[in-house]
């Protein structure tokens, strides 16, 4: 089973992904946890280029291709082999991040982006995507409080981050069977409890449980 976590910056995806991976492992499911951009040696190098705050002149399509290059590597090196081996893959951001940030945020053509994404991923789509929803104000304040890595995109305007959030909600609305939106402005434990309950409900409701 391929699960992705999406959402605006500061929504707590990384913490939630780590906790969820630990819980799945306790349940006996072998889990591979990956993050984007990165998750491979090549991808981590690309991440450095993407997040470098001095790279202020990066062209929007250059940004797309860098994210997609890191993703193509992650799919080939980590995600497809893990799924083929029957493991559960939990990915902290994936192709929907490009639609939300470069599409809705930067205003690039969504259909053109879909074509590039389909090439980069070979058409591999998550079975389930959690959107951890939070307002840009709260999300960015959390990142500042948490002393997290401050990347090039954090410097975008609040308006940009509003478009990203609205974009996520639109994507979720278009594919309600794949997406579940969770209110991430609550304490970590409450959000995590929801994710576990939703995942359990998905399995008992006929969705395929991750293969053991
Ligand atoms: P994060 O690792 O802290 O989530 O940072 C990743 C940043 O990169 C975040 O600001 C979102 C951005 N991003 C994109 O703009 N497009 C993408 O395709 C991906 C994966 C991330």
Image (cartoon, grey):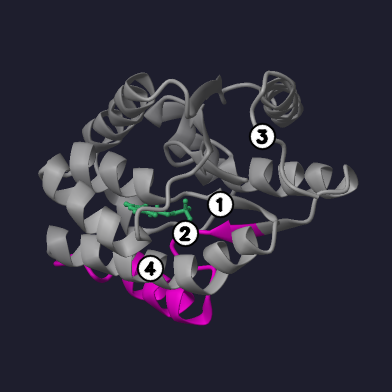
* In this view, 6 is above or below 48: above
Label drawn at residue 197: none
Residue 177 % position (x, y): 47, 23
Tell me whether circle 4 and circle 2 mark residues in contact (CB < 8 Å). Answer: no
Q: Is the residue 133 above or below the residue 155 in the image?
A: above
| In this picture, residue 128 sits left or right of residue 207 | left
- Residue at numbered disc 4: 72
- Residue 43 magenta-drawn? yes
| SS under mark 3 | loop
Label 2 vs label 3: CA separation? 25 Å
Task: Decide if residue 52 is in sight here.
Answer: yes
Left or right, residue 130 beside residue 123: right
Q: Position of residue 6 (x, y in %)?
A: 47, 39
Mark 4 or mark 3, which is nearer to you?
3
Examine the structure image and report whether residue 181 is included in the region drawn in magenta: no
Distance in Å between CA atoms under marks 4 and 3? 25 Å
Mark pair 1, 4: CA separation:
14 Å
Q: What's the distance in space between the residues labelled 3 and 1, CA to CA? A: 18 Å
Q: Of label 3 and label 1, which has the lower sequence position?
A: 1
Write the residue at 12% across / 64% down: 59
The residue labelled by disc 3 is 208
Q: Say which element carries label 1.
A: strand
Q: Disc 2 beta carbon < 8 A from ligand 1?
A: yes
Residue pointed to by mark 1? 91
Determine the image quadrant of residue 151.
bottom left
The answer to which of marks 1 and 4 sits earlier in the sequence is 4
Residue segment shown in magenta = 33-58
Sequence-first tag of 4 and 2: 2
Residue situated in front as seen by the camera: 178 or 196: 178
Q: From the top left corner, tell me how far across and down residue 191 is, in percent.
A: 67, 26
Q: CA distance from mark 4 to mark 2?
A: 11 Å
Say which residue label 2 marks.
Answer: 36
């Amino acid at each position: 089973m391929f699960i992705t976590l999406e959402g605006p910056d500061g929504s707590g995806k990384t913490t939630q992904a780590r906790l969820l991976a630990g819980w799945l492992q306790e349940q006996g499911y072998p889990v591979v946890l990956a993050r984007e951009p990165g998750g491979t040696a090549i991808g981590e190098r690309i991440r450095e280029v993407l997040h470098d705050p001095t790279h202020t002149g990066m062209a929007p399509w250059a940004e797309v291709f860098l994210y997609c290059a890191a993703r193509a590597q992650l799919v080939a090196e980590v995600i497809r082999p893990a799924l083929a081996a029957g493991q559960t893959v939990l990915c902290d951001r994936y192709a929907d991040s490009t639609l939300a940030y470069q599409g809705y945020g930067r205003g690039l053509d969504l259909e053109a982006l879909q074509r590039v994404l389909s090439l980069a991923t070979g058409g591999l789509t998550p079975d389930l995507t959690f959107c951890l929803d939070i307002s840009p104000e709260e999300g960015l304040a959390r990142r500042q409080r948490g002393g997290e890595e401050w990347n090039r995109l954090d410097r975008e305007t609040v308006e940009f981050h509003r478009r990203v959030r609205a974009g996520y909600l639109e994507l979720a609305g278009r594919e309600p069977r794949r997406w579940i939106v969770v209110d991430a402005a609550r304490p970590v434990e409450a959000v995590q409890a929801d994710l576990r309950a939703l995942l359990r409900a998905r399995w008992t409701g006929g969705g395929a449980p991750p293969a053991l």
